[in-house]
Image (cartoon, rainbow, N blue to C red):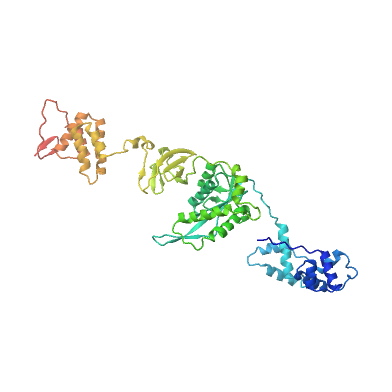
Amino acid sequence: MPRRKQARRTTVKDICAILRLRYDQGLSVREVSERLKISKTSVSTYLFRAREAGVSTWPLPTGYEDDGALKRLMFRRMGRPPRDLSQPDWALIARELKRKGVTLTLLWQEYRAGHPEGYGYTWFCEGFAAFERRASATFRNRHAAGAVMQTDYAGQTITVADPETGVITEAQIFVAVLGASSLTFAMASFGQRLPEWIAGHCRALSFFGGVPKSIVCDNLKAGVVKPLWFEPTLNPTFAAMAEHYDITILPARVGKPRDKGKVEVAVQIVERWILARLRNRCFFSLDDLNAAIAALLEELNNRPMRHVGKSRREMFEAIERTALSPLPPAPFEYAEWKTAKVHPDYHVEVDKTFYSLPHRLIGRCVEVRLTHRVVEIFHDHQRVASHLRRSQRSGHVTVPEHMPKAHQRYANVTPDGLIGQAARIGPNTAIMAERMMRERPHPEQGYRSAMGIIALARRYEPARLEAACERALAINAITFSSVNAILKSGLARARPAAEPAKPAPPHGNIRGGTYYQ
């Protein structure tokens, strides 16, 4: 297709030629147009302006021979000129316009009330626009290669329907762009929370295949706690991601979209070239939506840019790929950080589960790092405990080394363990411990009694304790108090090995050291 020729710009000499051919030679508008190669509309317009200026003869009247004078006369402002040329206080108008409910029309009406012969509304608006351009100059930032990646979320969403439940969810679109080459990345997620925010940045860096020096991002509450310009406070997880990739985070100012103008334009392009093409498609999973976005994104990055003549991908390969730092060997592992206070039982509660740490930190505040596999606890920037994360939200995860010495003796207490300890004293002691736990409604209720029987071995000889347990079993006194009373009364004596044991009476009680039937 032949390229359309650009129209020639009309000069003052052309206007003089139009007047000469029309008024001296008497040619028509069509004939003048064909002779000078100027459109008939332009010829008619110049002839009309000449008549309005009082020039309808050839040669030109005296005083109009100068090209500048003729131009000023023909292209002067039409309409009634203002009689009151006093300039409004544009600074005051700019301040008043920031107040709620105040419009430029209202301010012009107030201006005309004080200056009835002043300027009209159109000139008033043009003058105020010119003042704003002078007062707020625009800084054009020329991004160096590999210097910055800008990120933001698009305002437009795409619906994703669950095929089983029919629930419709609005998918959010994360957009990232490199400053020098304008190489663009986009992905969909089901929200703008911290996990989706971190995942978007990590996938964008993987897509670009390198790490720029800084990230200029939107001041999203999930990632930026306090969007201060000089000292912004980042979410600990977002800060950990920046440390992992060795990158600087620079949040944009609140209400200042020009701080991230590159991604603002990229969001508009993604909405027009990708999301608009997907508006009539129905998606049943997030993976299907991201696959469709990736296909159109490849087309967008390979499409030549109008004012550059090269595609975004070609610009990236030419100037920006080598300027990016290499990616870390391992991708960033998402982890959340929480602050917790150590309970009196030297545990902290994390996600409805209790994890232990050294008992010396009771009452202290610690930092907890949560991944999908591990729970790490830090105090004064030093890791003091690490546990495998439980999938169930209940119970305690305790390391015996975290307990005080007095508690460690009671750690991992089980019926079999207690019976084993009692068996080392003697068989009757083992039977006594077993019956103490078996005859309670719950074995745990007999733990203390059995542990008390075992503790008596530190005060009495094992043979004497064994004899006391034998006598208590004979009279069916299955309590710690009965065994302790037998030992204190001196009724328990170790028998010689050759002397056979006397059988215990079938019924009876102990009173004053004598059997009564």
Q: Is 140 left, or right, of 22 in this rendering?
A: left
Q: Nearer the viewer, residue 418 or 218?
A: 218
Residue 486 appears left or right of 371? left
Outermost left residue? 517
Toward the viewer: 123 or 360?
123
Tell me, yes or no, if residue 241 can be seen here.
Answer: yes
Give coordinates of residue 332: x percent, y percent.
49, 44
Please tell me which residue is depicted at 69% across the width and 55% down the height of the picture. Answer: 138
Q: Quick one: 484 or 242, which is closer to the camera?
A: 242
Q: What's the residue at 49%, 51% (across, down)?
A: 194
Looking at the picture, does residue 498 appear above or below residue 32? above
Q: Quadrant of the N terminus?
A: bottom right
- In the displayed image of the protein, which residue is found farthest to the front? 1
Residue 77 in view here: no
Res 359 quadrant in image: top left
Q: Is residue 173 above or below residue 93?
A: above
Extreme residue toward the right, this view: 62
On screen, residue 326 versus residue 57, left or right, reads left
Count of all numbered marks drawn on residues in the image: 0
Q: Position of residue 439 (x, y in %)?
A: 20, 43
Image coordinates of residue 48 in percent, x first then y, are 79, 73
Give the quadrant of the C terminus: top left
The image shows residue 434 at horizontal and vertical percentages of 21, 39
Image quarter of residue 257: bottom right
- Residue 393 position (above or below residue 515): below
